[in-house]
Image: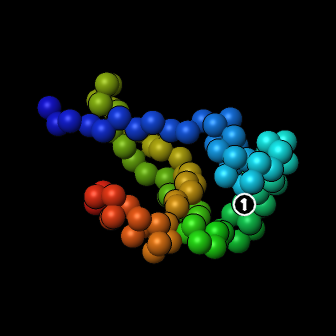
Amino acid sequence: MANKKKITALNKHDLLQNISTHSNYVSPDIVEDVYYGLVRVIGIELRDKGAVDLPDLGYLVLHNHKARRALNVRSGLIEMLPEKSTVKFKPCRDIKKHFHLLGDKT
């Protein structure tokens, strides 16, 4: 069995605290307001334009998947999966360089 890396994600509270600390101790409440404002703007831009450019980070792209047939392995029946949209993140070149410096192959 192949070894899988355990992914530890930063929860929202820790993320907001880290941003607050690294921003010369801007109030966590202000950081939280900016965070929710950013989430709203990203949602609106994705809905209206289908993509959002985040300077020095990368960009988010809305990817639409067509309805398709799929095999349910438990029942052995072929089922129709509905259309759906997913959001893909494409990191900028600087972030990709950073990962390569760390030794990851992404």
Q: Amino acid at mark 1?
A: Ile
Q: Position of residue 78 (x, y in %)?
A: 35, 38
Residue 45 in the figure: left or right of residue 79 = right
Q: Nearer the viewer, residue 95 or 64?
A: 95
Q: Mark 1: give few (<14), some (14-19) or many (20+) Cα within 10 Å.
A: some
Relative height, residue 104 to residue 82 (above, below): below
Residue 40 in the figure: left or right of residue 69 = right
Decide if residue 105 is in sight here: yes
Say what secondary structure mark 1 lies in. helix
Q: Residue furthest front?
A: 24
Q: Position of residue 104 (x, y in %)?
A: 30, 57
Q: Residue furthest top?
A: 74
Decide if residue 47 is in sight here: no
Q: How many marks?
A: 1
| Residue drawn at point x = 32 percent, y = 25 percent | 75
The residue at which mark 1 appears reads as 42
* Quarter assignment of residue 106: bottom left
| Residue drawn at point x = 33 percent, y = 64 percent | 101
Q: Residue furthest left?
A: 1
Relative height, residue 42 to residue 92 (above, below): above
* Quarter assignment of residue 14: top right
| Residue drawn at point x = 33 percent, y = 58 percent | 102
Q: In which quadrant of the rendered image does the N terminus lie?
A: top left
Residue 96 in the figure: left or right of residue 85 = left
